[in-house]
Amino acid sequence: MKVYDKLIALSQNRASYLCLIDPDKIDLEQAIYTAKLCQDNGADGILVGSSLMLTNNFEKNLKAIKDNVEIPVLIFPGIFNFVSRYADAILLLSVVSSRNPQMLIGEQVRAAPQIKEYGLEAIGTAYMLIDSGENTSVNFMSSSFPIPRNKPDIAVAHALAGQYLGMKIVYMDAGSGALKPVKNEMIKKIRMNIDIPIILGGGIRTPEVAREKAQAGADFIVTGNILEEKSDPQLIRAFADAIHSVKRND
Ligand code: 1GP
């Protein structure tokens, strides 16, 4: 079964939880430990990525993670050589909120032949940066303006464009470590207007906020930073339980 189909099947019953591991900030042992911790405490999948790599640990850590967990491991690309055979799939992002051609299509063209060579499943993703009250790494690194946080209509138009272009998932990101996560009102409005799943991340620091965002309509909630600060099994379990408590089709 394709990873995308697995994710769709999961999200039809309840909201799902994805843990983001930044391979730049950890060694091999920590990568394996964190990935197992996420799996054992209810995560539905693992994203591996960073906006920038200062070390050469990406592929090494990715392989170690994939070898040690059974839940899907997906590459969450940044601006570095991010394609690898050691993943179950790649979220092939086009930064639809950007007007920088390199982020819209340039990086994807660079990556495509290698994705084909590896037979890697590519999940076309409409990636939208949403303003979080301060500049984030991803805004700076992608030379992009985020969508204003109080303009849900602009966000809806971008998400719809992604869907009509054939992209399979919308990723709404306030950016790693964002001061303020994406507003519920914006999530609700996008949910009402598109049919494809929504991944939501950036600045989610408590299980309560994660639940709120899932209730607003996000199908997948991502946490990254908070797990780097506290790799606490109880906290991961609390995130998973809060997110999983949001059922679909009720
Ligand atoms: C960042 O959406 C992810 O791209 C996760 O954000 O690190 O703030 O949880 P955090």
Image (cartoon, grey):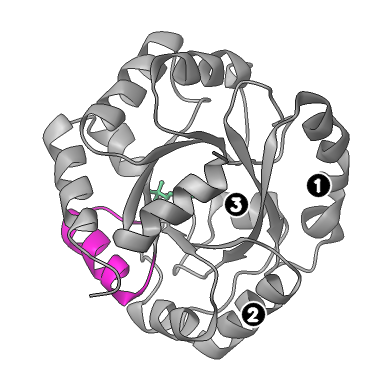
- Relative placement, left or right, of 186 versus 211 is right
Q: Which label number is shown at residue 138? A: 3
Counting from the top left corner in percent of width and height, residue 125 is at: 64, 57
When the figure is inspected, residue 148 is found, relative to residue 28, above or below; the finding is: below
What crowding class fits label 1: few (fewer than 14 Cα within 10 Å), some (14-19), or many (20 or more)? some
Ligand 1 under 8 Å from disc 3 Cβ: yes
Which SS class for mark 2?
helix
Image mark count: 3
Label 3 and label 1: CA atoms lie apart by 17 Å
Counting from the top left corner in percent of width and height, residue 19 is at: 37, 40
For the C terminus, the quadrant is bottom left
Label 1 and label 2: CA atoms lie apart by 20 Å
Counting from the top left corner in percent of width and height, residue 6 is at: 47, 45
Residue at 37% from the left image edge and 84% from the top image edge: 185
Please identify, in this view, whether the residue under mark 2 or under mark 3 is nearer the observer.
2
When the figure is inspected, residue 23 is found, relative to residue 192, above or below; the finding is: above
- Residue closer to the observer: 246 or 248: 248
- Relative placement, left or right, of 44 versus 66 is left
Counting from the top left corner in percent of width and height, residue 202 is at: 42, 56
Residue at 52% from the left image edge and 49% from the top image edge: 5
Q: Which residue is mark 1?
A: 108
Q: Which residues are magenta?
A: 203-218
Which SS class for mark 1?
helix
Residue 216's quadrant in the figure? bottom left
Which SS class for mark 3?
helix
Residue situated furthest front in the rendering = 1
When the figure is inspected, residue 98 is found, relative to residue 46, above or below; the finding is: below
Q: Which residue is mark 2?
A: 160
For the N terminus, the quadrant is top right
Ligand 1 under 8 Å from disc 1 Cβ: no
Residue 86's quadrant in the figure? top right
